[in-house]
Image (tube, rainbow, N blue to C red):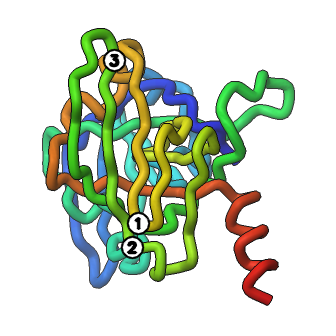
Amino acid sequence: MFTGIIEAQATVVAIRDEQANRHFTFTCPFTHELKIDQSVAHNGVCLTVVGLEGNTYTVTAIAETLSRTNLGQLRQGDNVNLERCLLANSRYDGHIVQGHVDQIGICEEVKDQQGSWLFRFAYKPQAAGNVTVEKGSICINGISLTVVESGADFFSVAIIPYTYEFTNLHAVKPGDQVNLEFDIIGKYVARLLQK
């Protein structure tokens, strides 16, 4: 389990395909603290550390993960947002994030609001019945954010300077894909209402 509070960014140093799997090797500020079999969220995708060597670590994404997330678009030198799993004695600063990306969203617009940025994203709600609500939570590339405006197939979020600078949102532009994990409570409520 995660909270959507980004600890650092990792840089892709190598990518290797093996059958339908893709192995990503990263470096990050806390590589020396990682251990084999540890869960780490990469752009909101929970992946297991499978290798450690020097100042790098390796994780593996299967075909399902590559088809449902933006990880398949990563290239050497790209940065991803990182969060290690929640400690039982930690403050819960974000919202409940599982590290299970529901679908891709497309950035439609970025507005500079002179001290903050408003990002608008489109998504296909029919893909899984995912919904947003104004002032509800959404996880974008692993970042816990509050929904500003909510529509049937779009939503917007406001980004403060700290989040803009210390996550990879500053590199997101219209047309780019982002990973979306919708609020788990909202997903259960939507499923119950369908019955």
Of mark 2 and mark 3, the one earlier in the sequence is 3
Q: Nearer the viewer, residue 110 or 140?
A: 110
Q: Which residue is mark 3?
A: 116
Q: Nearer the viewer, residue 60 or 142?
A: 142
Residue lying at the far top in this picture: please name it: 115
Q: Quadrant of residue 159?
A: top left
Name the side, left or right, on which 81 lies relative to 83.
Answer: left
Which image quadrant for residue 100?
Answer: bottom right
Q: Which mark is residue 153?
A: 1
Which residue is the site of mark 2?
Answer: 124
Q: Amino acid at mark 2?
A: Lys
> In the rendered image of this protein, does residue 48 appear above or below residue 118?
below
Q: Give coordinates of residue 127: x percent, y percent.
A: 46, 81
Residue at screen point 25% across, 11% down: 114
In the rendered view, tell whether residue 17 sits above or below residue 147.
Answer: below
Q: Secondary structure at mark 1?
A: loop
- Most extreme residue toward the bottom is 195
Q: Which amino acid does the dot numbered 3 rest on?
A: Ser
Q: Earlier in the sequence, mark 3 or mark 1?
A: 3
Q: Position of residue 14 (x, y in %)?
A: 20, 49
Alpha carbons under labels 2 and 3: distance apart = 27 Å
The CA span between labels 2 and 1 is 6 Å
Name the mark on residue 176. none
Q: Residue at x 27, y 19 (%)?
A: 113
Q: Secondary structure at mark 2?
A: loop
Q: Nearer the viewer, residue 3 or 131?
A: 131
Count of numbered marks: 3
Few, some or many residues within 10 Å of mark 1 (<14, 14–19, 20+): some
Contact check, label 2 and label 1, Cβ < 8 Å: yes
Quote the CA–CA distance across marks 3 and 1. Answer: 23 Å
